Amino acid sequence: MPLSGNNRQAGKGPAREAPRCVTRRRLIALSVLAAGSAKAQQRPKISKASKKLAGYIEKDDASAQNCSQCHFYLAPFDCIIVEGPVSPWGYCNYYAD
Ligand code: SF4
């Protein structure tokens, strides 16, 4: 049975094959993009220095240079680059203000 003009306009017949192919390509492209973005969202592992290596000490006084004033300090008891827990009144050789 030959295809009529109405069938082609309604999406039936050979003209219907092309969108399926494009959809498959889009699906593959989206899956590649999703895999790439998932990899981009993975954080690099940061290995922290030990307290001994950093020369960490806990001070009795609240001097100007202590963990609570440091750029790497994470309140209340953590540090970005030195293994915790750290005291807000601690100090190490990596101190940065
Ligand atoms: S002084 Fe050292 S231990 Fe304290 S927050 Fe800064 S880098 Fe971390």
Image (tube, helix red, strand yellow):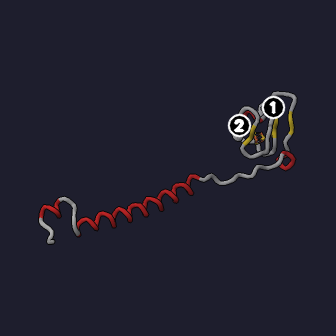
Residue matched to label 1: 89
Quarter of the rendering occupied by the N terminus: bottom left
Q: Are marks 1 and 2 in contact (CB under 8 Å)?
A: no
- Name the image quarter holding residue 90: top right
Q: Nearer the viewer, residue 49 or 68?
A: 49
Q: Nearer the viewer, residue 14 or 92?
A: 14
Q: In the image as oriented, which residue stretches furthest toward the left? A: 5
Mark 2 surroundings within 10 Å by alpha-carbon count, few (fewer than 14), some (14 through 19), many (20 or more): some
In the figure, 16 relative to 95: above or below?
A: below
Q: Is mark 2 within 8 Å of ligand 1?
A: yes
Instruction: Look at label 2 and name its amino acid.
Output: Leu
* Residue 55 rendering spot, x and y as whole percentages: 85, 45
The Cα–Cα distance between marks 1 and 2, rounded to whole angstroms, is 13 Å
- Is label 2 in a helix, a strand or a loop? strand
Instruction: Look at label 1 and name its amino acid.
Output: Trp
Residue matched to label 2: 74
